[in-house]
Image: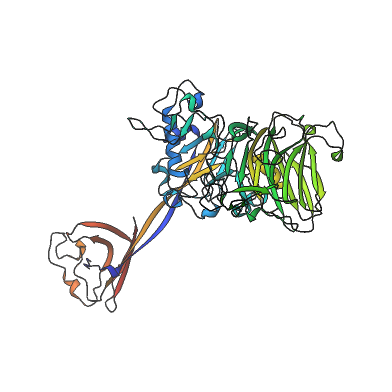
Amino acid sequence: MSVYKKLTTQDINISPFYVNKQYNFTSASAAASSVGFFSSSWTSESIYSYSSGAEGGSSSLDTLNTIKYNQLDHLFYKNFKRDVATKMGSIKNYRLHRRDIYKELYTVSIPSGLTGNQIKPNTFYLSSSTHEIIDDGFSHLILSGSDLDVSYSMDVRSNIFSLGPQLGFRKYDLSIINDSHEAGLYYRRGKKLMPDQIPNKYNTPDFGDQYDDSHYFNLIKYKNVNFSECTLNGGKFSSIDFGNLSSTVSSVQMYHNERFDFNPEDDFTISFWVKVKTLGITGTQNLIQKSKLETIIPTPNEKRDGVIKTNVTGALQFQDISAGPIYPFKIYISESLDSAGGGGQGACLFFERSDGTNTPQVFRYLDSTPSSTGSMQHITCRKSASIMTLYINGVQHATTTDNTVIKTQNNANIYVGGSSTTGDPVDSTAFTGSISQINIYNKSLTATQILNHYSSSNSSPYIGNIFYSNGLAVVTHPNYKSLDTINTLKFQNTYQIFENEYLCTIDEHEFGSTLNTSARRLKSSDSQYLANFTTGSKFQPYVTTIGLYNEDQELLVVGKLGQPIRMSGNTDTTFAIRWDT
């Protein structure tokens, strides 16, 4: 029997759904399927104009991989926290999402023919001779077996200050002005300065154009510092170098913010890596403190000639004054003191706070730790309940009781490096050394978290990002950027399928004729006459095949029924026709 029915939009229903296919590759089969594995690195020099590599570190510049680095940076990483509306990739929660880029990258590029619409979250697996890497379902790459909630502090809102500096590698070479443009044929990532223009220290012009790496965009000011590469647990990170100049000292400054006013009832943790240039120091060298000086704008001063008007030089200008004897934290290095356990033991690391009357402190001699001067050491200062604890390289070394009873908050600025007074005048106790990966938390980290933050070098469990829709997995963490031998690559792709459902209702009188030759008077498909028995009241044809045609009578879809369907002579019959596209 043939049934002809024009279907309307009310007869049609389209339902999307997803299907997945599992892929398992070795390095050889992955390459045969056009899966790419490549390393790339940043350079401060023009990828066209200069013959040497980044900072002159190689004899020739690999322009292709440098272009790949710039492309990944531009599409996914550059100004990520601020330009969230323009970023590509899957992001389920911006607050939980993190994208950190360093000087070198390792990338797995999967062609779209394999990924389909996207790589299915929580299915990516990459193993090398030393590491097993998976994705966490939120566009991050992590080490297989990582227990994120227990082993790390994951809430970015508790990490109120963070300064790697993550992009410090872009300031290694002070003879290059980064991100400048020059008219002409080529675009230059960095423009070379003339020899007489090269500064010997890096300075921020003023507060307002430099941010830390945290969720809070804290404004900071660099004063007379340099940037260099340091090794932390085998990975290359950026560090800030502090040292004496003829007229001033080096420091990183941040204006007062009440987020850092930790009172006796508040818990907090401060961690950082430090390298002391020499352990045989004299006096006191500041590492990190919210103490000593605060910045104010005084009212016009009374003079013999009267009040200074606001349009006179010196009126309503910033001025640093003493913040008083109360402070929430001060971390510094001091020479051997009798009160600290006797002289002759070298530099001593102090962590202290004060309410003006009580000044609890916990300390540890640096040269009695496994590593001493010349190498970076991880320091964690934790205040939990009434206990102050000092950790070095993830291991607890000293504790004391916090006996502050009244407020310890003040209006002081935060100073990293600098001198014991954190002012500009040079003295013999200005800090000389390097600091990296500074983090301040408004909670106490557990011993497990402190150990893992030390082991990861940058206090993060994330070793890169995966961009599911783009088929890119990018390992950015310096400790894991070199995957020497790829053993296995696994993932599931995702394809979107549409289930089309057409409802074809046939009234009891709506059928024309059958194409079955056995119902013809002459047993031939060319015969136009039906046999006599088809005109009887008991004749009820069966449906065996259903086809969908367009308006031009072109067959679009045809389906054979599993068994013939007998038409009812008393009721309507509805066929539900489904197929996937």
Q: Is residue 353 above or below residue 241?
A: below
On the rendered image, what quadrant is the N terminus found in?
Answer: bottom left
Q: Nearer the viewer, residue 289 or 498?
A: 289
Horizontal and vertical percent position of residue 68:
43, 35
Horizontal and vertical percent position of residue 366:
77, 34
Q: Nearer the viewer, residue 169 or 556?
A: 169
Q: Would residue 72 appear left or right of 529 to someone viewing this image?
A: right
Q: How many marks?
A: 0
Q: What residue is at 46 percent from the left and 44 percent from the top?
A: 76
Residue 460 appears in the figure? no
Q: Would residue 14 appear left or right of 250 to someone viewing this image?
A: left
> Outermost residue toward the top?
59
Q: Quadrant of residue 560?
A: bottom left
Horizontal and vertical percent position of residue 427:
70, 34
Residue 353 appears in the figure? yes
Q: Quadrant of residue 497?
A: bottom left
Q: How is the image coloured?
A: rainbow
Q: Nearer the viewer, residue 284 or 546?
A: 284
Q: Would residue 31 appear left or right of 172 to someone viewing this image?
A: left
Q: Nearer the viewer, residue 474 or 446?
A: 446
On the rendered image, what quadrant is the C terminus found in?
Answer: bottom left
Horizontal and vertical percent position of residue 534:
19, 71
